[in-house]
Image (cartoon, helix red, strand yellow):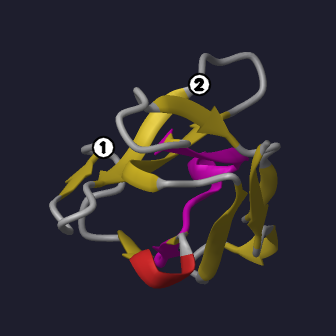
Amino acid sequence: QVQLVESGGGLVQAGGSLRLSCAASGSIFSIGAMGWFRQAPGKERELVATITRGGSTNYADSVKGRFTISRDNAKNTVFLQMSSLKVGDTAVYYCNADIARGLGSMANTYWGQGTQVTVSS
């Protein structure tokens, strides 16, 4: 069994900052890419940022320069530092990870349960 558990969401005023964390646990052999997605009410889930095991990152244009993704491979954890938050960043934020559960096993993508981020004006 593999679990991804997010934390760090909440209510913040526009211009403020939040840091999200997502820890993977369970039967894990290795973790490849990890990422953050978000889904606002009435909208489809969209990519926010991804990071490879080696640390290469990719960001949605809407968050470039404001959000920073990072990871701690020793702790199977990915972070999302969010700064200069806007009302439009309000959404449920989900983390995901490509996880192999054994030597030679194919990696599957696992998702967390989501954490609410609300930015007020």
Packing grade of label 2 (10 A; few <14, some 14-19, many >=20) is some
Place of residue 23 in the rendered image (x, y in percent of width and height, measured from the top left): 67, 68
Place of residue 70 in the rendered image (x, y in percent of width and height, measured from the top left): 37, 74
Q: Can residue 97 be found in the magenta stretch?
A: yes
How far apart are the two marked residues, 2 and 1, measured between alpha carbons? Answer: 12 Å
Could one spot residue 72 in this view of the protein?
no
Name the side, left or right, on which 93 lies relative to 67.
right
Place of residue 54 in the rendered image (x, y in percent of width and height, measured from the top left): 18, 66
Q: Amino acid at mark 1?
A: Ala
Name the side, left or right, on which 116 lies relative to 107.
right
In terms of secondary structure, where does tag 2 sit?
loop
Could one spot residue 94 in this view of the protein?
yes
Q: Which residue is mark 2?
A: 45
- Seen in the picture, residue 115 relative to 68 is either above or below; the reply is above
> Residue at the spot x=64%, y=73% of the render?
21
> Front-most of 74 and 95?
74
Q: Can residue 28 be found in the magenta stretch?
A: no
Mark linked to residue 22: none
Q: Which residue is mark 1?
A: 60
Q: Amino acid at mark 2?
A: Arg
Name the side, left or right, on which 36 lies relative to 41.
left
Q: What is the magenta range?
A: 79-99
- Seen in the picture, residue 79 relative to 24 is either above or below; the reply is below
Place of residue 3 in the rendered image (x, y in percent of width and height, measured from the top left): 77, 50
* Quarter of the image where the C terminus is located: bottom right
